[in-house]
């Protein structure tokens, strides 16, 4: 009898033990693991530049103004705002009920400190100083009112504010962590940094106090997920493997071949998004022969079948591009995109008109004993999928193509020395203003030295310099549409594909929706019971 | 007893010739057969290739091996057999050329170090030890980092990486040989250093160097392919086995043939050369005689 009592006791003890074990396991099902490609360097909004940083920063931080997927502006940390007539002074009225994740209160002083840091940038690569090129100062009128001043009309500022680089940091945390703030970010966002295991993962937990979601979000209050783990899986194939094994239930940019095949599986959801900004295109050098001849440049564009490249190299997951700007960008000019379409016969005619004829039957056209030669420096990270296919199209048209694989620094050096005929460029951005980074002729020798077309056109330069200061939206749009036309008419860009964001998700992931730059709103995501 | 008999009959039993010894070595023969096949493929590549190596056909991607495309097609519809055939030229060339560089410079340095001794020897041996402290691949990678990518640079990098082993081998052989009586004799009758080195010493140290070079070719092919796999060697469009293998790695579960055939090529080339090297080693190495 006594023994039996003992047994009952032991059994109930077991029950309690297993019971307690079972509880965290259950809440664990409300945790999401995401496979991402690149580990962030700094999660300081004023220090970030790259895609992984953007994705994480916007979970931890909030902007003054937020953009919904259709790019409409909504109040976030700022309740309302006014702009002066010149477009040089922006006044913001801030929310009073917001707390940083370290418990300190959000005030106008935090905005000033965050913007002052952003204008300087805290890393060499930081994107924020480029946005704040004409920033003068932020005046704190009182705890809930700030005025941001620029030296010239800053037409894009309200849209710029919605981007991660101008999100608001906790002044207390900046002071506490100093130079290490990028590893210990503290914002007002729906998720809090919990753990950063270098070269392995970053874990975020939900911010239980969060109650200031922008109005276009599906709910308010704390996020639906308890915890998110971002695992760094640099290889596409590893990300697919992690997804297939259930290690990650959401993966970014998986192998396109497998992803396109898995799209038909009812247990898998595939999400794609066409990124705005510059498309992935080859900038054509107008100073180096043979591409100094506009006929040769036009022939290059006519010789390439972008639709097929999209299918073969990207399994349709990165759509074909026909202009220097992607169709999802504000101010996209459809007319410029219709100037060229795949037409090998037209390419041949243009080349013959310029005297390029294959007289010795080796498949390569010559003129005065010189081969129709194209120097193509390539960065495998971005171009591996299509570079050989692109070259084969050019070969079919009678070009001799030499591809040299280089790294980032090698490409810049090659391009600055004007040794290239074509060089890949692309820039994801919400606004066509990015065109000035690489198409303003000021950037050929000076500036960022990235104007690899080496194309000098007074009208194009004028547009690219005046448009960012044009406050009237319609006038600004017209300027950028003209810019796209000038670029395509002069055949200095050979469009290849639009950048696409591709995500694979388990079928139990609910609430997946893209933000204007192709990242999911993790705040809205939940995991449904299967 | 036998010897006396032979002598009486006017017959001196010669040691069996190198060739007859080798002809009894099955693995050596196997190696030779495979290598000859690969060399034939390389030499007659333009005749054997059934398609243009670089003409992509977007309508025929990832076709499994069949009667028309013996090794199938790759991700942009190029014929893998044709690329395999031309790839054999590059891989064999890289192996051979790298070994020529390694053997040439390694032997010269080794002979100088071994023959002159003293300070030159200490200096050169110290240098080799420094080079040998780095794993071959790491050394090749550092050389590539300086020279930049490209096939010629791969040959140079792999060649430089093999210099130390040739130098050591040559040096130790010279050390043994230079104490021989006939060298003393040559010196006594007033031969110049250069004559002693090239007429008397070099022929006597060649055998171990040849064995080393043969085995080294296999390693050089592998290293060259590895560098191309990493994207440092052959540039895009070049049908090189290492880079073909690398290009197919993303499609292994869908299209095994894109990677497997170039991998098989690398495997066969290295296997055949190692079999030949082992066979030669058994026969030529003085210790095994």
Image (spheres, rainbow, N blue to C red):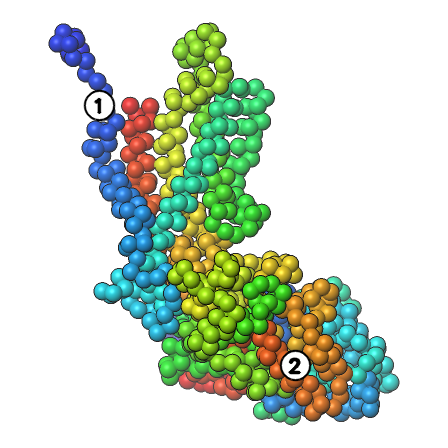
- Residue holding disc 1: B16
Closer to the camera, A391 or A264? A391
**In the displayed structure image, the side of residue A250 where residue A222 appears, left or right:** right
Residue in the image at 27% along x and 43% along y: B36
Residue A26, image x, y percentages: 48, 79
- Quadrant for residue A226, please give it: bottom right
Residue B152: x %, y % from top left: 48, 47
Up the image or down, A486 lies above or below B149; here it is below
Residue A294: x and y in percent read: 57, 72
- Please state which of residues A494 and A353 is positioned toward the viewer in this rendering: A353
Mark 1–mark 2 contact, CB under 8 Å? no
**Label 2 is found on which chain of the structure?**
A
> Of A462 and A202, which appears nearest the observer?
A462
Q: Residues within 10 Å of mark 1 (few under 14, many from 20)?
A: few
- Residue B131: image x %, image y %? 53, 37
Q: Quadrant of residue A113?
A: bottom right
Q: Is residue A465 left or right of residue A354?
A: right
The quarter in which the C terminus of chain B is drawn is top left
- Which structural element holds mark 2? helix
The answer to whether one can see residue A238 in this image is no
The residue drawn where x is 36% and y is 32% is B211
Judge from the rendering whether residue B127 lies leftward or rightward of residue B267; answer left or right.
right
The residue under the point 58% across, 69% down is: A293
A139 up-or-down from B10: above or below = below
Question: Could you give the CA–CA distance between mark 1 and mark 2, rounded to whole angstroms?
Answer: 84 Å
Callout 2 environment at 10 Å: few (<14), some (14 to 19), or many (20+)?
many
Visible residue check, residue A474: yes
- Asked if both marks, 1 and 2, belong to the same chain, the answer given is no
Circle on res. A483:
2
| Chain containing the residue with disc 1 | B
């Amino acid at each position: 009898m006594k023994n039996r009592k003992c047994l009952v006791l032991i059994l109930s003890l077991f029950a309690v033990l297993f019971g307690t074990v079972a509880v965290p396991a259950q809440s664990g099902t409300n945790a999401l693991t995401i496979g991402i490609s690149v580990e962030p360097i700094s999660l300081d909004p004023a220090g970030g530049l790259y895609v992984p940083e953007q994705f994480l920063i916007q979970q931890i931080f909030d902007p003054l103004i937020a953009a919904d997927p259709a790019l409409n502006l909504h109040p976030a940390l700022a309740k309302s705002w006014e702009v002066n007539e010149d477009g040089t002074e922006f006044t913001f009225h801030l929310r009073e009920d917001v707390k940083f994740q370290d418990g300190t209160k959000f005030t106008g002083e935090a905005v000033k400190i965050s913007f002052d840091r952003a204008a300087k940038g805290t890393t060499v690569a930081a994107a924020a100083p480029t946005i704040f090129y004409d920033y003068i100062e932020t005046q704190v009128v009182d705890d809930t009112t700030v005025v941001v001043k620029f030296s010239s009309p800053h037409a894009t500022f309200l849209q710029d504010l919605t981007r991660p680089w101008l999100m608001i940091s906790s002044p207390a945390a900046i002071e506490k962590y100093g130079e290490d703030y990028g590893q210990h970010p503290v914002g007002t966002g729906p998720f809090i940094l919990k753990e950063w295991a270098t070269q392995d993962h970053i874990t975020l937990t939900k911010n239980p106090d969060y109650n200031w979601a922008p109005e276009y979000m599906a709910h308010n209050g704390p996020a639906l997920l308890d915890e998110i783990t971002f695992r760094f899986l640099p290889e596409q194939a590893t990300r697919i493997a992690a997804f297939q094994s259930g290690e990650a239930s959401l993966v970014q940019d998986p192998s396109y071949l497998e992803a396109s095949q898995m799209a038909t599986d009812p247990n898998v959801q595939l999400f794609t998004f066409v990124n705005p900004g510059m498309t992935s295109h080859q900038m054509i050098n107008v100073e180096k022969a043979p591409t100094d001849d506009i006929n040769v440049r036009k022939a290059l564009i006519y010789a390439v079948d972008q639709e097929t490249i999209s299918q073969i190299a990207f399994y349709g997951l990165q759509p074909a591009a026909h202009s220097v700007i992607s169709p999802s960008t504000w101010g996209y000019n459809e007319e410029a995109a219709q100037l060229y379409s795949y037409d090998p016969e037209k390419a041949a005619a243009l080349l013959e008109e310029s005297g390029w004829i294959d007289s010795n039957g080796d498949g390569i056209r010559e003129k005065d004993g010189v081969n129709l030669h194209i120097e193509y420096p390539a960065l495998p990270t971005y171009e591996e999928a299509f570079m050989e296919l692109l070259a084969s199209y050019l070969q079919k048209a009678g070009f001799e193509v030499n591809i040299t694989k280089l790294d980032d620094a090698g490409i810049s050096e090659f391009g600055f020395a004007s040794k290239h005929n074509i060089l890949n460029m692309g820039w994801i951005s919400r606004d066509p203003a990015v065109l000035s980074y690489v198409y303003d002729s000021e950037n050929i020798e000076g500036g960022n030295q990235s104007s690899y077309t080496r194309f000098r056109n007074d009208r194009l330069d004028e547009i690219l310099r005046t448009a960012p200061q044009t406050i009237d939206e319609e006038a600004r749009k017209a300027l950028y549409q003209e810019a796209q036309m000038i670029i395509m008419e002069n055949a200095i860009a050979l469009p290849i594909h639009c950048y696409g964001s591709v995500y694979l998700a388990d079928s139990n992931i609910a609430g997946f929706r893209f933000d204007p730059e192709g990242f999911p709103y993790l705040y809205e995501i939940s995991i449904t019971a299967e | 007893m036998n010897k006396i008999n032979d002598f009486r009959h006017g017959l001196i039993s010669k040691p069996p010739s190198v060739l007859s010894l080798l002809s009894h070595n099955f693995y050596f023969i196997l190696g030779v057969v495979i290598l000859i096949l690969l060399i034939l493929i390389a030499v007659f590549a333009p005749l054997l290739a059934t398609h243009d190596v670089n003409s992509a056909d977007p309508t025929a991607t990832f076709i499994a091996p069949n009667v028309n495309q013996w090794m199938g097609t790759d991700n942009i519809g190029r014929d893998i057999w044709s690329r395999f055939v031309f790839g054999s030229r590059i891989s064999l060339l890289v192996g051979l050329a790298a070994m020529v560089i390694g053997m040439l410079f390694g032997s010269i340095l080794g002979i100088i170090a071994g023959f002159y001794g003293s300070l030159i020897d200490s200096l050169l041996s110290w240098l080799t030890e420094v080079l040998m402290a780095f794993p071959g691949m790491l050394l090749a990678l550092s050389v590539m980092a300086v020279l930049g990518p490209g096939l010629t640079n791969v040959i140079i990098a792999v060649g430089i990486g093999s210099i130390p082993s040739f130098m050591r081998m040559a040096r130790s052989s010279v050390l043994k040989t230079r104490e021989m009586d006939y060298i003393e004799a040559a010196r006594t009758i007033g031969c110049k250093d250069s004559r002693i080195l090239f007429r008397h010493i070099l022929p006597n140290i060649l055998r171990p160097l040849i064995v080393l070079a043969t085995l080294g070719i296999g390693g050089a092919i592998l290293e060259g392919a590895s560098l191309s796999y990493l994207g440092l060697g052959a540039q895009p469009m070049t049908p090189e086995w290492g880079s073909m293998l690398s290009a197919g790695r993303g499609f292994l579960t869908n299209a095994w043939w894109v990677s497997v055939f170039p991998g098989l090529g690398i495997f066969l080339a290295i296997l055949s050369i190692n079999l030949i090297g082992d066979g030669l080693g058994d026969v030529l190495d003085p210790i095994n005689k």
